[in-house]
């Protein structure tokens, strides 16, 4: 706790001073993280916090990293070594086994991850073990697959203020045999209220609009570069497999516009073979409480990009980009058949009143997914929480 009368800036200065005197003061480091979060800033991008984190004692490090579940690539080998020693010292400790399994999953060592999860008997770890076994099979399939089909580049959406997140995402995808390029994000909080309304957005959700505009910029960028296909990812995404240069192995139909390859759209059941679902079939297995389809990873064709940019010129930028993609992917009958009472049906119903008639993307969902989001906080949600001062 901070002393009474001390403002946020002073409290952060105290934490930094304590860490300068003692880099191993993990309590000051966690207070620094909490203070940064209160200001909508990410501790993982703060050099003082990153330096302090390396000095955490193992027990605190264990709890901290288990809750973060976003491991910097440069620290992954050392974290795995420490987690292995922790798990070996307490073979019956499920939390330690789960942490080790998660680290090995990120390192894409699926057989070792599966073995680690055997010692974490909770339901979630059992599901992760089945997933690891499936991905072990899929990794071998990708390694021996013929080089056919689409050859996408990777577009990484990233705000200028977050170079650390850009570097980390680029490192995550470095083993994937695909070229990368950065798409500068757009800070929705900088947009005026009249501009937000003119674009079809909500002044109280400027971060949502900024995110949508950044995706549209990625679609323009891929066309400007003459790309036929592009894997669009946000800078809180990481691959679940080392992705191939060409994507014929996934069995995508010719002429598709967009294919969701992220974990939120894919069914949760573990699989050891790739299959392609319609968006309607994927939504039939979508948990009713889940509030995001996720635009953290999708494959887009040039034809799909042209359609989307043309439609947006007329339909504007209302709602979230992921739900707009989903809405464009559903026929009127499929929209009407969505389970009532869930988040998906509500937002699709709103969009049905907003978007023009006759819009239809040739869209699909790949299962198991190729990309997942990591838990490092959402720039979009932070900007939304800041509200829209002076907009009304």
Image: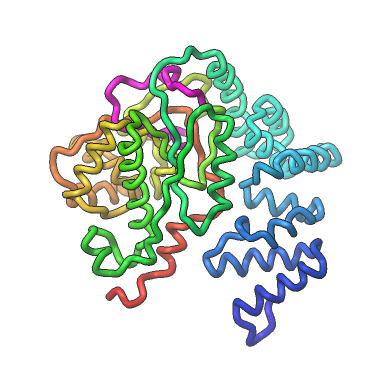
Q: Please give left or right for residue 80 compared with residue 390 in the image.
A: right
Q: x, y percentage for residue 176?
A: 54, 29
On screen, 340 above or below 249? below
Name the one closer to the observer, 223 or 312. Answer: 223
Quadrant (top left/top right/bottom left/bottom right) for the C terminus: bottom left
The residue stretch that appears in magenta: 243-267
Split into 4 quadrants, where in the image is the N terminus? bottom right
- Residue 152 lies, in percent from the top left, at 41, 29
Main SS of the magenta segment?
loop
Q: Residue furthest bottom?
A: 5
Q: Indicate whether 96 appears above or below 27.
A: above
Identify the residue at horizontal 60%, vertical 81% (top origin). 7
Instruction: Indicate whether residue 254 is drawn in magenta.
Output: yes
Pinpoint residue 20: horizontal percent, then vertical percent. Answer: 77, 68
Of residue 35 and residue 158, the one placed in the foreground of this image is 158
Which residue is at 39% across, 39% downward? 286
């Amino acid at each position: 706790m901070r002393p009474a009368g001390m403002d946020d800036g002073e409290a952060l200065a105290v934490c930094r001073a304590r860490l300068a005197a003692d880099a191993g003061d993990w309590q000051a480091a966690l207070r620094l993280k909490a203070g940064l979060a209160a200001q909508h800033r990410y501790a993982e991008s703060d050099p003082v916090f990153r330096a302090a984190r390396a000095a955490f004692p193992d027990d605190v490090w264990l709890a901290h990293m288990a809750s973060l579940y976003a491991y910097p690539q440069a620290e992954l080998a050392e974290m795995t070594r420490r987690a292995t020693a922790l798990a070996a010292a307490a073979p019956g400790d499920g939390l330690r086994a789960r942490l080790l399994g998660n680290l090995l999953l990120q390192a894409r060592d699926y057989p070792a991850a599966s073995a680690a999860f055997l010692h974490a008997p909770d339901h979630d770890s059992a599901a992760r073990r089945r997933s690891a076994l499936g991905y072990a099979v899929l990794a071998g399939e990708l390694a021996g697959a013929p080089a056919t089909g689409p050859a996408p580049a990777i577009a990484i959406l990233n705000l200028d203020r977050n170079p650390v997140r850009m570097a980390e995402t680029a490192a995550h995808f470095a083993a994937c045999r695909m070229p990368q390029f950065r798409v500068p994000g757009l800070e929705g909080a900088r947009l005026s209220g009249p501009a937000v309304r003119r674009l079809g957005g909500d002044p109280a959700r400027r971060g949502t609009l900024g995110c949508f505009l950044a995706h549209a910029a990625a679609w323009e960028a891929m066309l400007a570069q003459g790309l036929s296909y592009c894997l669009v990812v946000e800078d809180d995404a990481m691959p679940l497999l080392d992705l191939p240069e060409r994507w014929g192995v996934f069995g995508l139909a010719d002429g598709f516009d967009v294919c969701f390859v992220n974990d939120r759209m894919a069914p949760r059941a573990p699989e050891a073979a790739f299959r392609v679902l319609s968006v309607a079939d994927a939504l039939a297995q979508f948990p009713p409480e889940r509030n995001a389809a996720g635009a953290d990873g999708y494959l887009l064709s040039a034809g799909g990009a042209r359609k989307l940019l043309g439609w947006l010129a007329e339909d504007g930028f209302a709602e979230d980009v992921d739900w707009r993609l989903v809405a464009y992917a559903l026929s009127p009958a499929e929209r009407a058949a969505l389970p009532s009472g869930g988040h998906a049906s509500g937002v699709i119903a709103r969009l049905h009143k907003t978007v023009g008639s006759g819009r239809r993307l040739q869209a699909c969902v790949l299962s198991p997914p190729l990309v997942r989001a990591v838990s490092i906080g959402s720039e979009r949600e932070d900007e939304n929480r800041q509200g829209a001062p002076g907009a009304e």
